[in-house]
Image: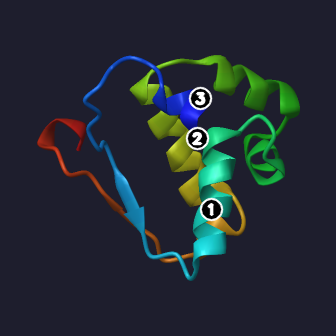
Amino acid sequence: GAHRTKRSGRPWTFVTIIHGFNDKITALQFEWAWQNVHKSKSFREAVGCDKLAKKMRKRLGLKARLEELRILLRECLPFCLYSLVVYFPEEKYR
């Protein structure tokens, strides 16, 4: 919430938009898993160990967040089972 949005760097731009969730609850679960990869059981199982998940969370920047997104979408249950659509509105992020 407010903790993440009060940081500098505004105006914010959308890097990616993910849609196709069955309901709001699933979308919120995905959002939480992406913001808390070091706590997410499915993410930790996908990467193989807790230490690696915690190490990945310490990485900074857009490239790190997109790598986490790739793992969530391809390897983490239940998210890899959904027909989610990932859209990159700006050409430079594709």
Task: Return the x and y of residue 89 as percentages of the image width and height.
Answer: 20, 51
Q: Residue at x 62, y 62 (%)?
A: 28
Query: Looking at numbered disc 2 in the image, what kind of residue is underneath it?
Result: Gly
Q: Which mark is residue 73?
A: none
The residue closer to the viewer here, 13 or 76, is: 13
Q: Are marks 2 and 3 in contact (CB under 8 Å)?
A: yes
Task: Return the x and y of residue 63 as percentages of the image width and height.
Answer: 42, 28
Earlier residue among tags 3 and 1: 3
Q: Is residue 21 left or right of residue 92?
A: right
Q: Is residue 34 above or below residue 59?
A: below
The quarter of the picture where the C terminus appears is top left
Q: Of discs 3 and 1, which sits in the foreground?
A: 3
Q: Residue at x 59, y 53 (%)?
A: 31
Q: Is residue 9 left or right of residue 30?
A: left
Which residue in the structure is indicated by mark 1?
28
The quarter of the picture where the N terminus appears is top right
Query: Looking at numbered disc 3 in the image, what kind of residue is underneath it?
Result: His
